[in-house]
Image (cartoon, rainbow, N blue to C red):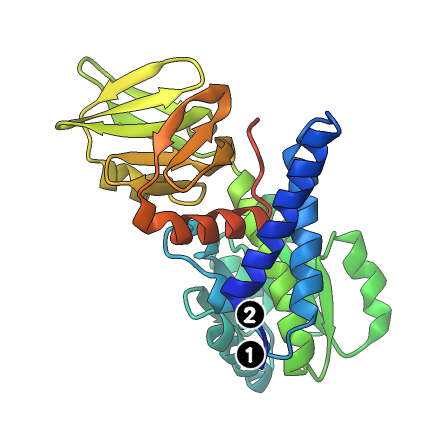
Amino acid sequence: MGMGYTKIMGSAVATAERMKTYLKAKNLPVLKEILFATLQTAFRCISKKSTKFLPINKVGYSRLEVIDLDIAVVDDEKVIREHISEMIENQKPDCHVACFSSGEEFLNAAKVFDIVFLDIQMDGMNGIEAAKETRENNADTVLIFITGIKEYVFEALDLYAFHYLLKPVTEQKFTEVFGQALREAGLRKMRRKKQLFINTRNKGITIDADNILYIESVSRKVEIHTTQEIIEAYAALGELETQLGGTFYRCHRGYLVNMAHITEYKSDCITLTGGETVYLTKKKYGEFVNAYMWYLQNGGASCV
């Protein structure tokens, strides 16, 4: 029997906590980068002891909108397009998959994709040419080339390709590469600057989401606590949760917290940058820990 995900994550978190205790005992700075690296290493080591494969979709949370990715599959062979898209949908059913039979059709869609599986040898515009145009418009796209000839790999690297798959594409290799691509695409998407547009009493303003510590629901209004000020606005907390997604977590009926600013947490409260604390519903403690660890594991970038 393999270890369950919750048990694996719990063991990894315990290891990171021991590292935190050690650093404090040695009067060393407790840096999030160190704890994150410890958590990642522990998670990988403990996971390898498990004989049960952990499907990618087991670590997905609806609150973390960053996992809602747009993926393109570009190949002139219908069988391969269907094979790749089927594996994507089996492993990550909440992603949006679009298939294209040529480089021209893909570029004409004029859409930004988070991940692109791109065949190199195609009639008309080949994959290298299509990738060059894609790179000019979007540097964040995770490019994965599909090819039957290894010599194209060097050209792929010139275009900052994330990976490549050699035909025939096996499910085992695809799962490995796709898992890495999901984490990278999630990281890149989370790093894109998010902004929140709200209406205050006198005007509409835009707030950088990175600067928000937490949002508190007060009667029919919300108080947005930023690193500089507190802003009152007429809005529903649920609506702001939907807009912000990703790095924000509803830790209490009346609080929405930015996970990028978390410095410490206990079973009943969360401490943020600057020392402010917000309530954490005890019933949601387990869900919060899983969500926060998923956020860190998938490249959550600290604003601290």
**Residue, x 24% and y 40% (percent of image)?**
253
| Distance (Cα) linking label 1 and label 2 | 6 Å
Along the viewing direction, whichever of 297 and 265 lies nearer the viewer? 265
Front one among 182 and 1? 1
Name the image quarter holding residue 181.
bottom right
Question: Which residue sits at x=47%, y=56%?
Answer: 67
Q: Observer-nearest residue: 288 or 217?
A: 288
Q: Is residue 30 left or right of residue 287?
A: right
Circles 1, 2 touching at the beta carbon (< 8 Å): yes
For label 2, the SS is: strand
Kindly identify which numbered label has been placed on residue 148.
none
Amino acid type at mark 2: Val
Residue 240, image x and y in percent? 28, 37
Figure quadrant of the C terminus = top right
Q: Percent position (x, y) of residue 214?
A: 37, 29
Whether residue 119 appears in this view of the structure is no
Q: Amino acid at mark 1?
A: Arg
On screen, residue 15 versus residue 61, left or right, reads right
Q: Residue furthest left?
A: 220
Q: Position of residue 98 (x, y in %)?
A: 46, 68
Q: Secondary structure at mark 1?
A: helix
Q: Is residue 92 left or right of residue 38?
A: left
Height in image: 172 above or below 145? Answer: below
Q: Is residue 236 above or below residue 45?
A: above
Tell me the crowding category of disc 2: few under 14, some 14 to 19, or many 20 or more residues within 10 angstroms, Cα based: many
What mark, if any, has residue 81 been given in the picture? 1
Q: Circle 1: is it few (<14), some (14-19), or many (20+) Cα within 10 Å?
A: many
Q: Tell me if residue 161 can be seen.
A: yes
Q: Position of residue 245 (x, y in %)?
A: 38, 44
Q: Is residue 153 above or below residue 30?
A: below
> Who comes first in sequence, dot 1 or dot 2?
2
The residue under label 2 is 73
